[in-house]
Amino acid sequence: MNQVIKKATLGLCVTLLSLSSANANQRYHVEKDIVFKTVGEREIKLDLYTPLAVSDAPYPLLVWVHGGAWKRGSKGAIPEKNPRLLESVLNEGYALASIDYRLSGEANFPAPVQDINDALNFLNEHAESYHLQAETLVMMGRSAGGHLAGLVGATNSAYTDVNFYATPQYKVAAVVSFFGPTDLLALGFKGNQVVSERSSVARFLGGIPSDIPEVAKQASTTSYINANTPPYIQFHGTLDKRVPLSQSEALKQQLDQYQVENLLFIEEGVGHSAPVFDTNKYVSHVIQFLSTHYPSK
């Protein structure tokens, strides 16, 4: 059921890490810096988090894409920025892969999407070694990572119309996006003003969106929605100036048009990356969404 809910107000090392000072007794396994791809001398890596509880069955796989305006950030940020979410999905029996990708200072679109696709194919190819169920998976991310997660989810179901990454060996079952851009052509305007070539979106695309509209559309999740698109859950604040709420609303409109199951949760009075989105108020909705569309048990 579509609805809008508005509310006021082979591994390299295995370590045990505390989730946070508030959850010091909650622990998990993490295998860090797994190289899934090399571009020239640049090694691109992922971290794989798994529950402490040993499972006879392979762990269902969630894939996390970090934010940072496509120009900064890293795979290692999730324990700090989204500790409640990380703890919750691991407690439910999921594995979570947090992946790096080339940033805009290194390469423009579509390089980051190619990197993410290659990471997912790598995890599928090595699923037995890592005790994963990786033929189907869920994409997740925040901000720019929410955009990339959503774009991979949408293009996965429309792959015949996509020619900018290698054939996917996996199926995206669902997408979780926290305040992620969805329409990069629209993001290229601030009111009536065109963004500068130094803006984050221009640096990501390799030009001002309105100057290269076909590239901007190719990089937009809204361009690929169809009846086979997987379910989406989105979270956004009404005062978000970096990624306007209209971005999530535009995607919801497309999903509704094709009768794709989706949820949009809107928090009144908060801006971009508001801490409330990593509290039980919203993490509980992620868990319910996963249990419906990609159950762990």
Image (cartoon, rainbow, N blue to C red):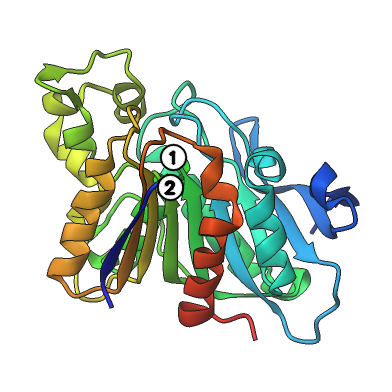
Residue occupying the point 80% across, 86% down: 56
The quarter of the rendered structure image containing the C terminus is bottom right
- Where residue 184 appears, as percent x and y from the top left, is 24, 37
Task: Mark yes or no: residue 292 visible.
Answer: yes
Q: Is mark 2 on a helix, strand or loop?
A: helix
- 279 lies left or right of 171: right
Q: Name the residue under label 2.
A: 146
- Where residue 103 appears, as percent x and y from the top left, is 49, 30
Residue type indicated by callout 1: Ser
Q: Looking at the image, do the residues carrying marks 1 and 2 touch, with CB atoms under 8 Å apart?
A: yes
Q: Mark 1 points at which residue?
A: 143
Could you say which quadrant of the image residue 126 lies in?
Answer: bottom right
- Viewer-proximal residue, 135 or 1? 1
> In the drawing, what numbered circle is on residue 230?
none
Q: Residues within 10 Å of mark 2 (few under 14, many from 20)?
A: many
Residue occupying the point 46% across, 79% down: 293
Could you say which quadrant of the image residue 135 lies in?
Answer: bottom right
- Where residue 220 appears, as percent x and y from the top left, is 25, 46
Task: Mark yes or no: residue 14 visible.
Answer: no
- Viewer-proximal residue, 248 or 271? 271
Q: Residues within 10 Å of mark 1 (few under 14, many from 20)?
A: many
Residue occupying the point 88% across, 50% down: 24
The quarter of the rendered structure image containing the N terminus is bottom left
> Residue extending furthest front?
8
Residue type indicated by callout 2: Gly
